[in-house]
Image: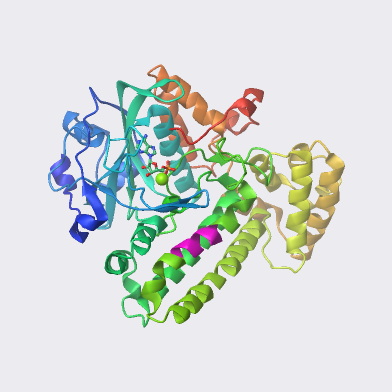
Amino acid sequence: MNTNDLSFRNSFASLGEAFFCRVNPEPLPDPYLISLNPGAAGMLGLDRRDLDAELIDCFSGNRVPAGAKPLAMLYAGHQFGHFVPQLGDGRAILLGEVKDTTGSFWELQLKGAGLTPYSRRGDGRAVLRSTIREYLCSEAMHGLGIPTTRALCITGSDEEVYREQIETAAVLVRMAPSHVRFGSFEVFYYRDQHDALQQLADYMLVRHFPHLADHDRPYLALFLEVVHSTARLIAQWQLAGFAHGVMNTDNMSLLGLTLDYGPFGFLDSYDPDFICNHSDHEGRYAFSRQPAIGHWNLTCLAQAMLPLFSDDAEAAVAMAQDALYAYKPVLVQAYADGMRAKLGLQDKHPEDHALVTDLLQKMQADRVDYTRFFRALAHFRVEDAGKSCAAADEFVDRDAFHAWARTYAARLVQENSQDEERATAICRVNPKYILRNYLAQQAIEKAAQKDFSEIDRLRQLLSQPFDEQPEYEEYAALPPDWAEKLSVSCSS
Ligand code: AMP
Ligand code: MG
């Protein structure tokens, strides 16, 4: 296998120069492979043995593979609530699409491949630290069943990059069916380029929403699908305890994928006010605000798509509002269903909301570890109510747990829940392993010493987060005290 077999094409390039800037990747001096993701590679028909010098050159930006048309995509975006009229890929370069073994196309982007006309004050590079975080988290999310961009590999170099300290450069090869963002639409709306807006919507409809082709109002139907997929995505984030950190509209995928991993974080102890991004001083993107921000971002997208909905401005606004109304019920339903599953409950019950709220309040008050608690619940037995058990052990305030557990146990009896079945069901939806910040940090510190083994170990572990994997028990432990002091910000 060589890169010719990957057979690149670039359909986004056919949109025309209004949508991007052509730019070649900047070579990375003496690149070497840091990690290859066998899952993503396998989809493309590649394996470790295929990663010869030629392919490493392609994946580090030192060679442009045949058929690729490298470009930086244009977009705008609302960043922390403020509109920025022009952003665009400042350090990501789209090579084009390749076909996977099932015939589906994936865009391949080199993240950190050098300056583009949209780099503004940035250097076009990504540091090894941030590529490791994105690589591991996108695969962890995939393992959790949460829609996300994928990561194919990381290549690195000894080239120095300046952030708060001196670090080294790396390139992440990222994959998605499309990297189009809410901001890809906003840029043309605010420039009054309604033809381009329509062209982009048509492009997305043909390639990614073909089932909407015969719809009376395909653009509105497209928007409504984005409303639904975003609502479902954010419900999944909340259920997994994932905080994105920078939910600007330029980081929101039109396909409802988790996109642009930066200062993200998973909850350790349950805290709705958790702010993972050190630079987010006002907590705009705090964990519990994500559902509301999702709606705010969709409103920005709706605004940008108004000219496509109808020539009658008032009618267009009414349509957008109608579509936006779908967001909350979809999200609330997905979250409620997901929470019921986390608790191992089968039937819907009017008291479920109170049961969940009461539990979360108690977990917050007692700073209970979110992931460990739900996993431990698999071992709960009805006769455990009031007694010591793994779930109770996650609480310091045992009485608080027992108070909740009595209601929970009654609920289990009511639906004749079987312990064995419930334990299996709980373990299928509550991961044992998540990418805690400190785990990523350990892989990063080893990688800085040129030991990349921890990256591969974590990637493998997190690709099966629901499996027991007893040999990795320590990775499911409570985070060590030093983890509290770790801080992540936008600088990457
Ligand atoms: P983000 O919030 O990380 O998704 O990035 C916001 C914008 O800044 C995007 O347009 C990025 O392409 C750009 N950007 C981030 N880091 C760099 C960098 N090191 N060099 C150039 N552009 C960057
Ligand atoms: Mg971004």
Which quadrant of the figure contains the C terminus? top left
Q: Residue at x 60, y 69 (%)?
A: 329
Q: Where is residue 261 in the image (x, y as percent from the top left)?
A: 45, 42
Q: In the image, residue 179 lies at what x, y percent? A: 34, 52
Quadrant of the snapshot with the N terminus: top left
Q: In this view, does 297 lie to the left or right of 474?
A: left
Q: In which quarter of the image is residue 31?
A: top left
The reply to whether the magenta stretch includes residue 115 is: no
- 85 versus 280 height, above or below: below
Q: Which residue is painted at 53% across and 43% down in the image?
A: 245
Q: Residue 307 at x, y = what percent?
A: 38, 73
Instruction: Using the image as rendered, state which of residue 185 and residue 232 is in the foreground.
Output: 185
Q: Main secondary structure of the magenta part?
A: helix
Identify the residue at horizontal 23%, vertical 22% (top origin).
Answer: 30
Residue 298 is inside the magenta segment: yes
Q: Does 216 sit above or below residue 424?
A: below
Q: Magenta residues, as a range? A: 294-301
